[in-house]
Amino acid sequence: MIRLSIVMPTNRDHLTAISRIAQACSWAGPETEVIIRDNSGSASKLRLVKEFERDNCRIIAADPCGVHENWLGGFDQAKGDFVLFVCDDDSCLDRSIAALPEKIEEVLGDSTVAGITGVTVVDNVRGTSLAGYEKIDADDGMTRLMGYLGSNHPPVLLYSAVRRDVMQWGMDIVRSKPFKLSFDDQIGALLYLLRGKFVPLRRILYCYNQQNWEAFDGAQREDLKYYLGAALDPALNKLHWLLCAFEGAALIRNVVSDSDHPLPARQKMADLWFATMFQRFRAHPREDLGSALAPEAEKLCVKWKGAAGQLTFENILADICQFVALFSQEEAMKYFAYWGNILGLQQAPAA
């Protein structure tokens, strides 16, 4: 019986990445499967890593594709009760991986457990630190969300062993969103926390290399790749955290069932999420990345930063859609169709 699926989507073609793949393959065992999905298109890399295959360890040669597709393609092959994603520039501690199947066995019958998480080592240019979240093992969803949002860590909760049906639910929602953006890692962590608690492994589990996201300017260059990949105008970067605030709060309010969280509790959680992300929007001005639509994006920033007490989902959605329509009517209609349906709207409201 496979208790744990470890999925590594890989694109990098250098010795460090190959060493990470070799380590991941070594974790395969009777209760643990390892899935390596390589979309690099490198024949020499594939020949080498194919030598690492063993029982319960598969190397999948995928056609060149985007990051999301590579992750989702790897997940679709997973059979374990819990799934752990590992990036090909990160690593895990061998003993912690070995301890996970037994921990999974302990919590398997408790449907209130969404995942198992350990301490994460975060490595960046400023140094190395230990990241963890307080109270995400609480039964109460609001307490879990407060623990997550109250930390000052990157969203390393994603690098936990997550119950496969919970991960499937979260991925289906993220996959269905009209725009795939870099803050979807925040949305993914939010969705997991809405579904249940995360029990601690009480070990260092994951070593996270923050290199691409460690500096503000570099992180925005990474964000730009997502906007361009989704065929969106880069001026949307100025509205980055407003979009994240709106999308996360709308999902909390409207896609979680009453049996998981009653409506009053969902409203409080949505308010907390929105307030946290909106504060990022207000406090951290972002670049227009050379867009001709920068003046229009700046007008929206000024409007919403001064709109305290007058914020509604409907009006935010109207403004976002009207801005997107400046460069693509089709994308604006897609965005309204999806989020209007989430909010139960029949037609676009006036901005």
Image (cartoon, rainbow, N blue to C red):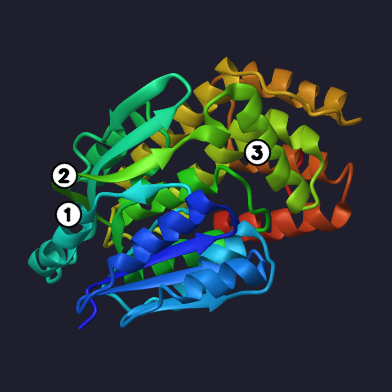
For the residue marked with disc 2, what is the amino acid?
Arg
Kind of residue at badge 1: Arg
Q: Which mark is residue 95?
A: 1
Is the C-beta separation of discs 1 and 3 under 8 Å? no
What is the number of the mark on residue 290?
Answer: none
The circle drawn on residue 222 is 3
Kindly identify the residue that appears in the image at 80 percent across and 52 percent down: 231
Quarter that holds the C terminus: top right
Query: What's the residue at 58%, 36% (across, down)?
Result: 312
Front residue of 288/328: it is 288
Q: Are marks 2 and 1 in contact (CB under 8 Å)?
A: yes
Q: Residue at x 31, y 59 (%)?
A: 258
- Per the image, label 3 sits on a secondary structure element best described as helix
Mark 2 packing: few (<14 Cα in 10 Å), some, or many (20+)?
A: some
Which one is in front in this view, the residue at disc 1 or the one at disc 3? 1
Q: Which mark is residue 203?
A: 2
